[in-house]
Image (cartoon, rainbow, N blue to C red):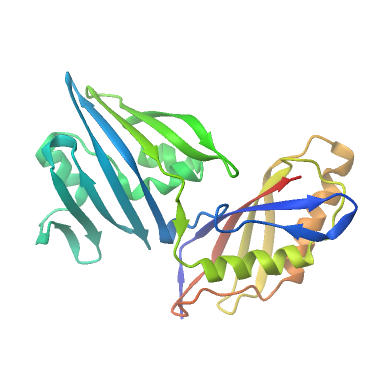
Amino acid sequence: MKFNNISILLLTVTLLNGCSSSINTKPSTCIIDPNTLNITGKIGIRVQDRFNSGEFQISFLKGFFEMTITGPLGFGSKVIKEESSGLVVDGEHKTMNFNDWMLNKYGWYFPVSKLPSVFLNDQKNIEKSFKDWDFKSLKKQNPCNYPKLIKFTHKYKDVQLKLAFDKSIRSSDKHYINNFISKIRGKLDYQDAKDDWGCDVHILQDSNGKVESVHLQSCSIDDNTKSKPFKDAIEKAIYDSSPLPTPSSKNIVDREIIFYFRVKQ
């Protein structure tokens, strides 16, 4: 059994006042796993004084992607796959990767494979992967603050992209995600949290799901007297949930899990 590098989830829980055992969530709308992410939407591309628009669908799987795009840049309709064997465009294998193919064809490239980091607000990965781009998230979608519209502007080329995302952002392994949420929420015992309190939670686990360590970072808690009890409750719930559920594919178990824990009243 081998480890994948990382799994990143977004967990939103609803705390009912006075009843710590009653915790509800909507996992199908509040989870992002970048290894099994599917997104659809509309795209607008401006290159100098030329503008095109179209639609896209992108499926991410373990660091690779498959993208269907219609309209922009004279594509008409194109299916682009970046997989372990290399780049495939409309069924034709290319001798270069996606970034080099775009550079060769258009003189610039957009790092599609790193797009999940924008959804997850993974600043370290964003700065590294989008070093040639400025971007602004213009709107958010409830209930989990997914981007609705993002504008990318190239720093060195007269190129601008606008991506408008549909609400049907989903992960393919919902059974694993539901089990993950259910187990942790069943162990959580805290009654005094306020709306939008939250933390980035980093978990290290072994190949059987046994929790080895839990670290909370970038917490948003507006009451210093309750900060430690709140964080202790999250940490205890995770340790008490050990061993954690494992994905349906037993061949790959994530060594590190990051999830964004946020309270919604």
Q: Could you tell whether 88 is left or right of 142 in the image?
A: left
Q: Could you tell whether 249 is left or right of 17 in the image?
A: left
Residue 259 visible in the current orientation: yes
Image point (18%, 39%), residue name:
71
Image point (67%, 76%), residue name:
243
Q: Is residue 100 above or below residue 51?
A: below
Residue 251 x, y percent position in the rendering: 43, 79
Given residues 74 and 123, the one toward you in this image is 74
Image point (77%, 70%), residue name:
240
Given residues 37 and 208, the one toward you in this image is 37
User: Which quarter of the figure is the C terminus placed in?
Assistant: top right
Residue 7 x, y percent position in the rendering: 51, 60
Given residues 63 and 39, the one toward you in this image is 39
Image point (27%, 42%), residue name:
55
Residue 199 x, y percent position in the rendering: 68, 47
Q: Could you tell whether 60 is left or right of 181 in the image?
A: left
State the count of labels.
0
Residue 131 visible in the current orientation: no
Q: Could you tell whether 150 is left or right of 82 in the image?
A: right
Residue located farthest toward the top when viewing the structure as drawn: 49
Q: Is residue 145 above or below residue 52?
A: below
Residue 225 occupies quadrant: top right
Residue 218 x, y percent position in the rendering: 66, 42
